[in-house]
Amino acid sequence: MSLQNPVFIPGPTNIPEALRKACDMPTIDHRSAAFGKVFRPALEGVKRILKTATGEVFLFPSTGTGGWEAAITNTLSPGDTVLAARFGMFSHRWIDMCQRHGLKVQIIETPWGQGAPLAAIEAALRADTGHSIKAVLATHNETATGVRSDIAGIRRAMDAAGHPAMLFVDGVSSIASMPFEMDGWGVDIAVTGSQKGFMLPAGLAIVGVSRKALDAMESATLPRTFFDFRDMARTYAAGGYPYTPAVGLIAGLARSVEMLEDEGMEAVFARHHRLAEGVRRAVAAWGMRPCAATPDLFSDTVTAVVVPEGCNGTDLVKLAADKYGMAFGVGLGEVAGKVFRIGHLGMLTDVMVLSGLATAEMCMADLGWNVRLGSGVAAAQDWFRGSVPALAMAAE
Amino acid sequence: MSLQNPVFIPGPTNIPEALRKACDMPTIDHRSAAFGKVFRPALEGVKRILKTATGEVFLFPSTGTGGWEAAITNTLSPGDTVLAARFGMFSHRWIDMCQRHGLKVQIIETPWGQGAPLAAIEAALRADTGHSIKAVLATHNETATGVRSDIAGIRRAMDAAGHPAMLFVDGVSSIASMPFEMDGWGVDIAVTGSQKGFMLPAGLAIVGVSRKALDAMESATLPRTFFDFRDMARTYAAGGYPYTPAVGLIAGLARSVEMLEDEGMEAVFARHHRLAEGVRRAVAAWGMRPCAATPDLFSDTVTAVVVPEGCNGTDLVKLAADKYGMAFGVGLGEVAGKVFRIGHLGMLTDVMVLSGLATAEMCMADLGWNVRLGSGVAAAQDWFRGSVPALAMAAE
Amino acid sequence: MSLQNPVFIPGPTNIPEALRKACDMPTIDHRSAAFGKVFRPALEGVKRILKTATGEVFLFPSTGTGGWEAAITNTLSPGDTVLAARFGMFSHRWIDMCQRHGLKVQIIETPWGQGAPLAAIEAALRADTGHSIKAVLATHNETATGVRSDIAGIRRAMDAAGHPAMLFVDGVSSIASMPFEMDGWGVDIAVTGSQKGFMLPAGLAIVGVSRKALDAMESATLPRTFFDFRDMARTYAAGGYPYTPAVGLIAGLARSVEMLEDEGMEAVFARHHRLAEGVRRAVAAWGMRPCAATPDLFSDTVTAVVVPEGCNGTDLVKLAADKYGMAFGVGLGEVAGKVFRIGHLGMLTDVMVLSGLATAEMCMADLGWNVRLGSGVAAAQDWFRGSVPALAMAAE
Amino acid sequence: MSLQNPVFIPGPTNIPEALRKACDMPTIDHRSAAFGKVFRPALEGVKRILKTATGEVFLFPSTGTGGWEAAITNTLSPGDTVLAARFGMFSHRWIDMCQRHGLKVQIIETPWGQGAPLAAIEAALRADTGHSIKAVLATHNETATGVRSDIAGIRRAMDAAGHPAMLFVDGVSSIASMPFEMDGWGVDIAVTGSQKGFMLPAGLAIVGVSRKALDAMESATLPRTFFDFRDMARTYAAGGYPYTPAVGLIAGLARSVEMLEDEGMEAVFARHHRLAEGVRRAVAAWGMRPCAATPDLFSDTVTAVVVPEGCNGTDLVKLAADKYGMAFGVGLGEVAGKVFRIGHLGMLTDVMVLSGLATAEMCMADLGWNVRLGSGVAAAQDWFRGSVPALAMAAE
């Protein structure tokens, strides 16, 4: 594995130089005013990225998994029911966590490659006339299959059903890379991590919490201390933190928001779409297709490429690492072997994406797959050439 | 707060140059073999520092607080009883966490400034003839008061009582700075964090677990997922990790162990003792005394200095930060205002300690305390001059 | 210009992570023993890379240009004659410098794209029966044209002519990337810089000096102080330096030698050759050719690509920078516009090279050149796939 | 030597965190527009620091010594006469350089510890009725003795004598730390380096050049190429550079100017004065005195402390390094052994200075000098306490 090549795993992403430096800081006293100078901007910045005006943001020295646990333990009680669709490894894992915490999970099994099944969710909610479902869990971007679900649609389904459940969204591999509207979509808890759209090292769970979820917090009885929103809220109000914060990552987060906003969130989303489209054109040129069933489900942060019959995606990932020092993602769970994944989120350039595509092609040839060298690269080149924003050419 | 001055909070510590660089690394694929090259040495190294030949080590992207939670949720069940002495803010917080997780805590209230009460612990265990106490919780170094307790003594008390409870030790501000013997003392779970004796940024909970605790894990029913030892053990065995690891901190941890072992653990402990003694001589020269009641309790990583009647330690800490850009620790809980704390753990030099003492003196004079400028410095200088190890002078 | 894309200028090169960190160091006292610990290994390491057992190495806070000036001012006197061939911008500049320092330069004009003309050199030396020529100047790798000259051949020519002149070699863009034999080839002064094969930032002139050149130093009367070998030799002998050294770069140089030797110099040269060959295959697939006239002249560190009639290489370089954030080199002097240059020296991977080739292709298409997208990439992919060393696949 | 202790050599200084990071950058193409974005602000910033509205600034990958050489070789011709006073090692070295370059140096020998002898300079100029003296060389701050000379006074002397010579000033250890007025004082060439008041690593010579000196350049015949102002001026005008620039240091220089101007130059000068005064009070408390003969000569960047009869300053410097890992400066030349030097320039805090003073005291005690531990520290503490700017306490 070469430290010089970009990574194409769907997170952690390639860390921009400026964020490396923002995180790498000497020790400051986290009980002093100096801490507030990095902490406040980070919290306020994340609220803007999440598009929440009324919610709170809590930062845990943890990961997205910890964020999920914070979401459920702060708002639910043993025996509570949650509704969730399972259509990939990460939706599966959240369901598993709920079960391990003594929650009842009403699972809507959905084929991998599909997104959140809006009609089924609405039907389930309508059927729950006693409102025993306390929360709907939704994976915005299923990293295992490269599927983006329609969170606004889930909100509409919930509203159509007139159901008071909370809406919890795993936005780990979507937030800051694809449009996200916490208030607009009525999201009660939004979970992400530092190592995806925020382009930082792993180590921070970033959790947005609505007023409604904060109210639920008061009566929730699942035990929690490390992840307790109450301790967070109380100490934040006093400019503090309930334990030792990961100051460097928080400083990095503040800087990350600055970078994102300097580029402009619309431009960030457009860039992700443009690069993703380049990858998809290469995939098509290889005669393959994304795991995501239909174009409306295509993720702009990761593409799970379905490999030809008789081929094994995991072989490609292993060969890329061993022979060319480049990291792609393997297929997980039901699609293990059937796909390999190309992460294309965070701060990437056309040039970097082309290097990933070219490497994938070499591996395919090495493995004897029926792919012409340069074919995917050419398709992506053609797309990139024509789609570079005018601004990028003028500026910088 | 100046980034140029050393910090004298009792953690996070001043991060050595080499560890800053070890942590600041580009993204690698944590599912590739490259990860094992930093992860394995970190795990093995921590085992050596903890002095455990048979236990396991788990690393969580978290903090010491998370380490405590991992300890109790993986080994205990709701309604279980634990025995703990309360004699400082950190022993208090662990007790509070247990209560919030539905455990019964048999609390031995102990004056702040005292250490773990061996006789009372033994008595409590002898009285528990039904062995309802599942674990004894002990804070090795109470960071709030600068008191080091006798963990070997607790083990002897437990053995004397013939009690089968597990022994859980908070070694957050002791491990890697003061002698610690996980196997020798029969410690079942040892908890620390990256930001103390390991001299790294905050963000890693480091947990050593004995075979006995691993056995208890199988029947424990407190809910946990993020902190679940089982997921850790299973994925580690396959060279993996249950979620995205904090790779930079883990790389830093491997490097930290290397630094510590290059110096030699005995030399590390001796250095901490020597610097602590310099601080204590300064304190005596100021006509003050440590909060720790007797010399056998003196911590080598932090000194809580009892301020004169009518003075407020918090004023000193605030003034030091505002006027001189230097960080000390305030008194917490019962000793708020009554002490200020000088952290002296991690990679410090005589020169750095003297700068802290000199600054404290300026603040005392500014606040009108009855202290002669240079008096504490002179006492420490005299001690440091005479106690520099011969080796240090010869080598380097 | 994106900081994320690799550069393909023929130096400075992409700086490896480990060298970035080695250079970025806190201030140490350059008059203390600590300095010697980085300085000695750097000097000794450079001698091994230059393959000199008897020569000295001097390091100037300067650049290759400064190294040239050190070479001539320390060994020659006003009015002295030197012999040089001019076949590119860098051979031209050294000649110009000699003239500005009052030396007579006997110039052998040679077409750009050719290398050092061995026969003409030998003839000129034979004709100089009075031995007025004091030194022969040779550019090992002419960076402007991507031509590698035969230094061993020059030595043979000098020996055949029985001429006592010194041999000064500009190895700026060859040393540490292509075979170099200071003692073996009878080189009297070898000049390079930190920012090429040593993969460091610019800022150090690295000069190897033979015994014969050191003897010539005694009688040389060209004025010099900053570049004076005598001050260097005298202070080095005492473990010092004549003025403030660039300690970070020197530390980086020591680390660079370590990296090179860990890889093995033969492997380093083979890697450069392999990557260069990939570039040349792409160039051929584009229907173009290197500026270097014949394969024996092909440089393994830079390829000057002759662009088709009616095309302008400078347009490509400008477009690559403006539109794709990638840096290639323009043509200089006689070949301005007629070529663009692809630097492929330093620590590069196959993957990185492919990203450069893919970008060049996009620019060609943008400029309407008659090149099929993916064609050069495919040729390089094919070569890279088949030529990855077995070792690389097994190891790491 | 510990990397954790501050250095107290009179340069290179302790590099602030932000400047470490500014210098440590990936490779950019120095022939692209990206270079201009760091280069322009650096040049313009230096002009403001030098206080020149009409002069030019040139940056050489070199050191202050190189800056001296650039000054003389670009403006003078062999056989020209310069006037210089010798009163320390650095004034001596510049004189030596002139002699080695074939200039006649009219030397005014002046006792070490004195500053530039204004009356003698005026007398020499008046006596030079034929105006054979082409330049007056002045060392603004003689780093060897800690003496600041009166450059405005030299200008007045030159004007009083009605002499047309140019005025060249070595401001290596004064510029950016003590007031300097290039235009106001009629300085024709001002020389400094990156590693002093600009707080960067060594590696850049920074040279300010007046119009008059640029005119002199046209007829100067001393040979030069690397240091040639003409190449610099020509390439700068086109946004370029005559060879590979030290881009990282230039980026650091731009950032350094930003830091200095954010603090405010008057505040920077006041800070240097305040810290220097603290050192001097400690020196007085030790019963010693600065080498500088009178208070008007006291340098605010370095204090050469005259050690008691029978003591050897070099012993203290060696002991501080070996035993305490701290760097002071030895006495040089005529004052070798008779002084030790405390550098107090660059970004220092009260706290850091106290650590240096405390260490010096320990060494004195170790060496058996008659000094009371804590005495100098107390004197400095007393001064620092009372002189902290109100602003510093309010802000930050």
Image: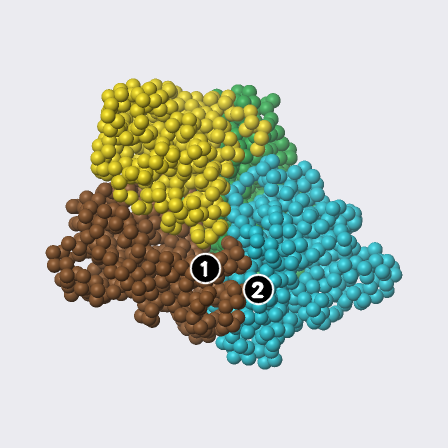
Chain colours: A yellow, B brown, C green, D cyan
Res B207 visible:
yes
Res B27 visible:
no
Mark sitting on residue B314: 1
Viewer-proximal residue among C87 and A126: A126
Q: Residue at x 26, y 27 (%)?
A: A131
B258 relative to B107 in the view: left or right: right
Q: Residue at x 30, y 55 (%)?
A: B92
- What secondary structure is marked by label 2? helix
List x then y, in percent, for residue A374: 41, 25
Give the amino acid at mark 1.
Answer: Thr
Q: Residue furthest right?
A: D129
Give the amino acid at mark 2.
Answer: Arg
Q: Quadrant of residue D234?
A: top right
| Circle count | 2
> Which residue bears the numbered disc 2?
D385
List x then y, in percent, for residue B185: 22, 62
